C-alpha cells in the first residue's frame, strides 16, 4: 500500500527522492517523509497529509545528503500523525516499510524489556529498535539486518540507512514488491518501476526473500538463503511524460480519455487484426484444454473477472467461476481435475490475489494471469501470462486498466471458443471484428460527456444510489456503484435488476436515484419494467443505453444517456465509460479528491 524510494548517489538525493515519492503517492497519501544520512548524522523530515505538506516542510527546513530514503504512507497501524509517519529513525538507523509485521506486538515487548521506548503506534518502528539492539551487540549493518529479518513474520518491503555507514542502503522484500534501479550516478530502490523511471535506465525486481545491498558504485542481491545472486535487469520503459496530466485537470480524466488507444493496443497484442487469429495459438490451446476456469481478483478487477465468466461460458462453453481472492484463499475447495485459475490484477502485486494464486497452484491448477505490470510478482509466477497494455494508471480509481482487462477477457473468450469448437470460424471472426471496432466506439462514447455533466450535478447532493443491470450489465452495475463510492463517498449498491423485488426495492423513496444499464440484446424490456416499479415509488431514473432501448423509457423526469450504436459484446465497454464519467463529475461537483480518494491506495499489498 505504501510507497518506498531510496537513493545513494554522487550528488544530493533529495530532488530524486521527492520526485520518486510524487510518482508513488498513489500508493498512499496519509503522510510522507524522508531521511538523509551524512557524516554520521541522520536527519528526517515528516509531514501528515499529502506530499505537498512534506514539500513545504523541506522548503522551510532544508535537508540534504547523498544517501536517503523516502516514504508515502497508507495507514495500517495507527492514525495519520507525525509520530506514525515514516521513516522511523533512531540515532543509528532509519527505516521505511511497506507491508504488515504480524508479530510486531511480541517483538515490541522484547524491545521494551531491554528498556527501549516507542514513540509511535506502528508496526514498523519495531524494525528500527531491533536493528539498534543488534548493532549494540557489535553486529555490522548487514549482519544486523539479516538477524532482524529472521525475526519478522508477515509481509514487508524495507529500506534502511545507517549512521555508521552513510554510503550504504539495505533493502529486503517478502510479500511486498521492491525494485532495484541502476543509474549513471548511483543506485536506487523503489516500490515499483514508476518510482525510479525518472532517474534509472535499468531496473531489476527482487525475488521473494531477497536482500539488496546498494552503494553509489555497486549493488549486490542475496537470496533468502544468503547466497549472492543475480537478477535480470530490464530497461525502464515508463518515462517522465507518462505521469503528467497534460491538459487534463485530473489523472483520472486523462486516463479515461486514453481508453480508446490502450484498449486497441491491448487487443492487437493478443489478436492479429489482419486475420483475427491468436498471436500465440499455443497459449489459447492450453486454455481450451481446461475443464473449468476460476477467475480470481479483488475490487474492480473482480468485476472484470465476473464479466469474463459471462463471456467464457457464452462464447467458449467453458465452465467458469468468478472468485473474490480474499475468500478463495481461505475457503475449502472441491477438487477440480484439469482446472485453471486466472488471476486478474492491475499491479500484479495485490496481496490477496497473490496468496489465492499460490493456493490455486497448491491444488494443482494451471495458473494464468491478466496483469498490467509485466515484471510484477504475479506476472513472473503464472504459467501463462496475458498482459494488458494500459500503461501507468495513476488515478486510484481504475479506468483504463479495467477496460483493458475486459478487452483481454473478451478476446480470450472468443479465441478459446474457436479453439474448443464452440464457435465457427466466421462467428469468431465477426466477434473479434466487433472488438477491434472498440477504439472508434469508445472515442464516440467519450463525446457524450456533456450529457452526463448536468446529471452528475443533480446527483451530487444525494445520500444513496442504486445501479441495476442484467446479464453482462450486472457486474457493470456493481462497478458503477463502486466508482461512485470511491470517488464521491456516496453510498451506492449494484444489483442484478431481477433481484430488485427481493429486497433492494425497500431502499426506494422519493428522489432516490436509480441508474439502469440498457441494451436491446441484454433483456432491456425486463429492466425497463423494473424502472417503472422504482419510478412509481418516487425514484429518479437515470438510464444509460442504446437508442432502441431508451425509446421505450417513457418515464416522466427520467435522465436518458444515449450511447452510440453498439453490439452485445461491445455493450459492456460502451457503458463502462459513462459510469466512470458520471462518478468523476459527481466527485468534481462535490469537491472530493478525484485522483486520491480518502482511505484508499492504488496497490493493495497488505491483507
Image (cartoon, helix red, strand yellow):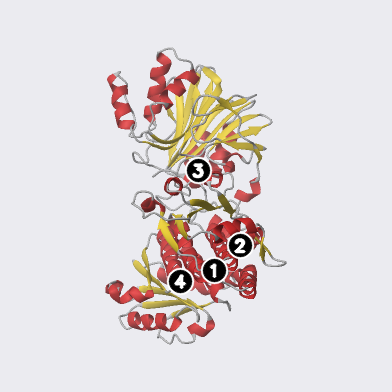
Q: What whole-number distance in Å separates the C-alpha atoms at marks 2 and 4?
A: 19 Å
What is the spatial separation of the Cα atoms under label 2 and label 3, in whole angstroms?
Answer: 33 Å
Task: Check whether the beta carbons of the residues at disc 1 and disc 3 lie within 8 A of each other.
Answer: no
Q: Which one is closest to the eye, mark 2 or mark 3?
A: 2
- Residues tagged 2 and 1 counted as in contact (Cβ below 8 A): yes
Q: Residues within 10 Å of mark 1 (few under 14, many from 20)?
A: many
Q: Residue at x 47, y 47 (%)?
A: 603
Q: Earlier in the sequence, mark 2 or mark 1?
A: 2
Residue at 63% from the left image edge and 74% from the top image edge: 430
Query: Which dot marks residue 263?
Result: 2
| Disc 4 packing (10 Å; few <14; some 14–19; many ≥20) | many
Q: Is residue 400 visible?
A: no
Q: Residues within 10 Å of mark 2 (few under 14, many from 20)?
A: many
The residue that disc 3 covers is: 52
Q: CA distance from mark 4 to mark 3?
A: 40 Å
Labels 2 and 4: the sequence-earlier one = 2
The CA span between labels 2 and 1 is 10 Å
Q: Are marks 4 and 1 in contact (CB under 8 Å)?
A: no
Most distant residue in the top direction: 138
What is the x, y in percent for residue 446? Answer: 58, 69
Q: Which residue is mark 1?
A: 573
The answer to whether residue 318 shows anywhere in this view is yes
**Sequence-first disc among 4 and 1:** 4
Amino acid at each position: 500500500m505504501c510507497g518506498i524510494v531510496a537513493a545513494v548517489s554522487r550528488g544530493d538525493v533529495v530532488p530524486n527522492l521527492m520526485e520518486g515519492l510524487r510518482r508513488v503517492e498513489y500508493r498512499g497519501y496519509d503522510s510522507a517523509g524522508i531521511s538523509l544520512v551524512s557524516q554520521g548524522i541522520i536527519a528526517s523530515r515528516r509531514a501528515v497529509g499529502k506530499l505537498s505538506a512534506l514539500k513545504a516542510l523541506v522548503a522551510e527546513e532544508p535537508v540534504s545528503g547523498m544517501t536517503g530514503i523516502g516514504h508515502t504512507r497508507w495507514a495500517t497501524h495507527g492514525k495519520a500523525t507525525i509520530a506514525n509517519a515514516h521513516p522511523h529513525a533512531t540515532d543509528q538507523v532509519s527505516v521505511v516499510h511497506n507491508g504488515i509485521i504480524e508479530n510486531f506486538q511480541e517483538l515490541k515487548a522484547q524491545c521494551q524489556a531491554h528498556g527501549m521506548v516507542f514513540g509511535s503506534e506502528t508496526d514498523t518502528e519495531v524494525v528500527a529498535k531491533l536493528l539498534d539492539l543488534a548493532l549494540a551487540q557489535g553486529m555490522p549493518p548487514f549482519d544486523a539486518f539479516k538477524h532482524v529479518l529472521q525475526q519478522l513474520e508477515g509481509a514487508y518491503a524495507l529500506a534502511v540507512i545507517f549512521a555508521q555507514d552513510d554510503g550504504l542502503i539495505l533493502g529486503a522484500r517478502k510479500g511486498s514488491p521492491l525494485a532495484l534501479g541502476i543509474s549513471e550516478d548511483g543506485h536506487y530502490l523503489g516500490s515499483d518501476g514508476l518510482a525510479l523511471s525518472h532517474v534509472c535506465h535499468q531496473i531489476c525486481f527482487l525475488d521473494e526473500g531477497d536482500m539488496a545491498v546498494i552503494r553509489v558504485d555497486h549493488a549486490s542481491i542475496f537470496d533468502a538463503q544468503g547466497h549472492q545472486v543475480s537478477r535480470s535487469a530490464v530497461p525502464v520503459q515508463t518515462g517522465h511524460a507518462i505521469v503528467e496530466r497534460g491538459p487534463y485537470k485530473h489523472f483520472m480524466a486523462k486516463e479515461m480519455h486514453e481508453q480508446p488507444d490502450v484498449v486497441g493496443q491491448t487487443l492487437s497484442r493478443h489478436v492479429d487484426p489482419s486475420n483475427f487469429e491468436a498471436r500465440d495459438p499455443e497459449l489459447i490451446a492450453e486454455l481450451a484444454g481446461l475443464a473449468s476456469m476460476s477467475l480470481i481478483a479483488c475490487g474492480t478487477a473482480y468485476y472484470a473477472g465476473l464479466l469474463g465468466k459471462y463471456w467464457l461460458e457464452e462464447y467458449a462453453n467453458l465452465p467458469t467461476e468468478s472468485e473474490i481472492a480474499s475468500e478463495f484463499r481461505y475457503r475449502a475447495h472441491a477438487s477440480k481435475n484439469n482446472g485453471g485459475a486466472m488471476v486478474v490484477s492491475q499491479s500484479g502485486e495485490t496481496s490477496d490475489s497473490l496468496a489465492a494464486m499460490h493456493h490455486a497452484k497448491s491444488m494443482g491448477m494451471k495458473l494464468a494471469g491478466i496483469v498490467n505490470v509485466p515484471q510484477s510478482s504475479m506476472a513472473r509466477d503464472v504459467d501463462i501470462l496475458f498482459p494488458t497494455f494500459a500503461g501507468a494508471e495513476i488515478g486510484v480509481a481504475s479506468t483504463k486498466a479495467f477496460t483493458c482487462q475486459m478487452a483481454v477477457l473478451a478476446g480470450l473468450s472468443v479465441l478459446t471458443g474457436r479453439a474448443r469448437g464452440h464457435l465457427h470460424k466466421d462467428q469468431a471472426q465477426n466477434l473479434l471484428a466487433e472488438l477491434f471496432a472498440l477504439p472508434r466506439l469508445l472515442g464516440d462514447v467519450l463525446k457524450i460527456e456533456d450529457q452526463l455533466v448536468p446529471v452528475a450535478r443533480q446527483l451530487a447532493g444525494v445520500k444513496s444510489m442504486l445501479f441495476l443491470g442484467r446479464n453482462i450489465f450486472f457486474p457493470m452495475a456493481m462497478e458503477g456503484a463502486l466508482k461512485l463510492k470511491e470517488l464521491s463517498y456516496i453510498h451506492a449498491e449494484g444489483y442484478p435488476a431481477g433481484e430488485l423485488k427481493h429486497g433492494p426495492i425497500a431502499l426506494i423513496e422519493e428522489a432516490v436515484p436509480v441508474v439502469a444499464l440498457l441494451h436491446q440484446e441484454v433483456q432491456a424490456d425486463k429492466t425497463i419494467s423494473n424502472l417503472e416499479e422504482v419510478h412509481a415509488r418516487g425514484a429518479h431514473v437515470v438510464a444509460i443505453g442504446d437508442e432502441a432501448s431508451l425509446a421505450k423509457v417513457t418515464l416522466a423526469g427520467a435522465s436518458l444517456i444515449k450511447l452510440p450504436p453498439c453490439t452485445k459484446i461491445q455493450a459492456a465497454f460502451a457503458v463502462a465509460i459513462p459510469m466512470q464519467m458520471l462518478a468523476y463529475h459527481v466527485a468534481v461537483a462535490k469537491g472530493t479528491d478525484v485522483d486520491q480518494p480518502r482511505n484508499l491506495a492504488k496497490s493493495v499489498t497488505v491483507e
